[in-house]
Amino acid sequence: MLTITVGGESNQTLAYIEGPSKIVLDRKGTFIFKVEEDNDTLQDVTFSLNNNLATIIEIKDNYTCIVHANNKNLLGDCILSAVYNGNTYNKTFSIVPLW
């Protein structure tokens, strides 16, 4: 599992999207937005995708996003974006064939 960490400036929240780097056609992948901060009252996260190779099918507990890859043999890279506290965090993953 690949994790991309963004942020790190002293005045910026350290956060990242954890999830798979590949999803097989017509399968699901789970992505979790993680925040490293001491505040117990975290704000909601808004998820979005940059193209139609995959679809967000469910958002659980405001920090977990389940993505379903297409079943039309469309392959390529997707970018899942999460907006949190006015900042955008991205995670790139690929839609790959079964074999």
Image: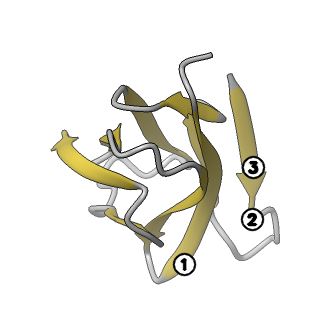
Label 2 with label 1: CB-CB less than 8 Å: yes
Mark 3 vs 1, N-terminal side: 3
Residue at the image position 34 percent from the left and 56 percent from the top: 42
Inspect this view and state whether residue 62 appears: yes
In this rendered view, identify the residue nearer to me: 52 or 47.
52
Q: Is residue 75 above or below residue 23?
A: below
- Residue 41 tag number: none
Look at the numbered discs 3 and 2 and tell me whether their residues touch, using CB distance below 8 Å. Answer: yes
**Residue 43 point in image, percent of width and height:** 30, 63
- The answer to which image quadrant residue 12 occupies is bottom right
The N terminus is located in which quarter?
Answer: top right
Q: Residue at x 19, y 45 (%)?
A: 57
Query: What distance separates the C-alpha of mark 3 from that of mark 2?
Result: 7 Å
Q: Looking at the image, which residue is at 46% across and 83% down?
A: 86
Q: Which residue is mark 1?
A: 87
State how far apart marks 2 and 1 are (Cα).
9 Å
- Secondary structure of the residue carrying tag 1 is strand
Q: Please, what is the three-letter code of the amino acid marked with disc 3?
A: Thr
Which amino acid lies under the numbered mark 2 shown in the image of this protein? Answer: Gly
Label 2 belongs to which residue?
A: 7
